[in-house]
Amino acid sequence: MPKRDLITGLPIDRDQARPRERADAARNRALVLDAAERVILADDGPVTMDRIAKAAGIGRGTLYRRYPDVASIAAALVDSRERRLQGAVISGPPPLGPGAPPADRLAALYRGVVDLLEAHTPIYRAISPGPIRYATGAYGFWRLHVRTLLVAAGTPDPDALLDLLLAPLSPDVYQHQRRTLGLSPDRIVDALTLVAHRMLG
Amino acid sequence: MPKRDLITGLPIDRDQARPRERADAARNRALVLDAAERVILADDGPVTMDRIAKAAGIGRGTLYRRYPDVASIAAALVDSRERRLQGAVISGPPPLGPGAPPADRLAALYRGVVDLLEAHTPIYRAISPGPIRYATGAYGFWRLHVRTLLVAAGTPDPDALLDLLLAPLSPDVYQHQRRTLGLSPDRIVDALTLVAHRMLG
DNA sequence: TAGCAACTGGACACTGTGTCCACTTACCCT
DNA sequence: AGGGTAAGTGGACACAGTGTCCAGTTGCTA
């Protein structure tokens, strides 16, 4: 079984020219993410591979052909949601985009991710906390971006600080702050902004 | 079914005088944690309730009587491991104990927790990442402690900052830094120390 | 339009869960 | 002392979800 890309579900094999994906396969691939989102948002009972397959109108085997487990599907869903924010980071207006001081850009990134966490709470909850998170394209992107900010700010050992600064964005932590502690998104963003300025200011 | 304390597995009912725990129950309760640790450290296959019950020489029903799932057992195990560090924080010598400036105390706490994460990696890995973490006595203790440090340092909105500063200690994040990134414990502690001083210094 | 490789989907065996209840046993009371 | 009783015990059970497998199907290419 060939390794598959987390986001697209397509097989990964860089070198050789591979026969085009068949039309029915492509169609099903598109169906899966929609179906997964529906199942997650419906929110009755646990999100299982079986449910997603049924919602997509395909068989279990077909689903397993692309995604090894529910977490991967949720991760793919999250990735697709984060594309827009990534675009804004690369080429949008400051302070999120290039041009502003590193501390402001980090604060803006924090705000952007909090907005996402807020908007897609059920999806983030479905992506089981755990190692999968660090393998997503989205996480890789944040890492890369924060790293350049740290370097720009002249902070020592950016590679070790990186994940420490991203840790507060873990859906777990955010959920805990929102639900259990009852903090408002604004208050969380303010606290994160303080972190950004103290760490990079 | 009465709620049970995460650590001791004893029923929680503050007000009324409750009949003493029976001797056989107490014996089994002690057996469970030992057995759980053995199963976790053996590390062949997943840690299941069934395995722990067998290792303890008791039935599944008896195990479920005290702990609702594996995560709770692991949490209890972790709590018992963190008692010593908690003692040092309360009444040990500075900088971990009272007397040192808040930033130094936070840095010392970071180091202490990293040492624990390092020493008991398999156990921390067994406690499934997720909401259980925030319900443990240990986490509550760190929260309380860090809160007093934040207040002492005069930081704004300590209640919102709290969990942000504890987030980097999540076993997930630590595992990721150690295994995937290959960072040394010392390097991680150094980065955490920087965080402590920038945030409270 | 024939051949074939990719794709499909449901059946299957399996693992772990959580509940239930008849039996056992430690402790309290007289 | 020993009987009553409620707490404690443990294995059987029904169930949910997993991941694999393979015979059948279908889209693509030559």
Image (spheres, coloured by chain):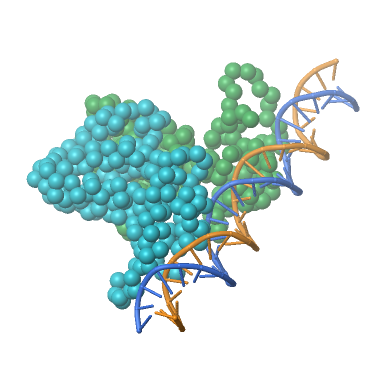
Chain colours: A cyan, B green, C orange, D blue
**Spot occupied by residue B143 in the image (x, y as percentages of width and height):** 38, 32
Front residue of B145 and A43: A43
Occupied quadrant, residue B182: bottom left
In this view, the residue in front, A74 or B88, is: A74
Q: Quadrant of the C terminus of chain B?
A: top left
Q: Can see residue B143?
A: no
On screen, A99 above or below B148?
below
Residue A36 picture location, percent across and down: 42, 49
Residue B41: tell me if it is visible.
Answer: yes
Left/right placement of residue D25 relative to residue C27 reads: left
In this image, A38 relative to B12: left or right?
left
Task: Please report the residue visible at 13 percent of the width from the left and 41 percent of the height from the top.
Answer: A95
Looking at the image, residue A33 sits to the left or right of residue A59; the answer is: left
Residue occupying image coordinates x 29% and y 40%: A116
In depth, the one of B63 and B18 nearer the eye is B63
Q: Residue at x 55, y 55 (%)?
A: B46
Tell me which corner region of the image, top left, top right, bottom left or bottom right, holds residue A1.
bottom left
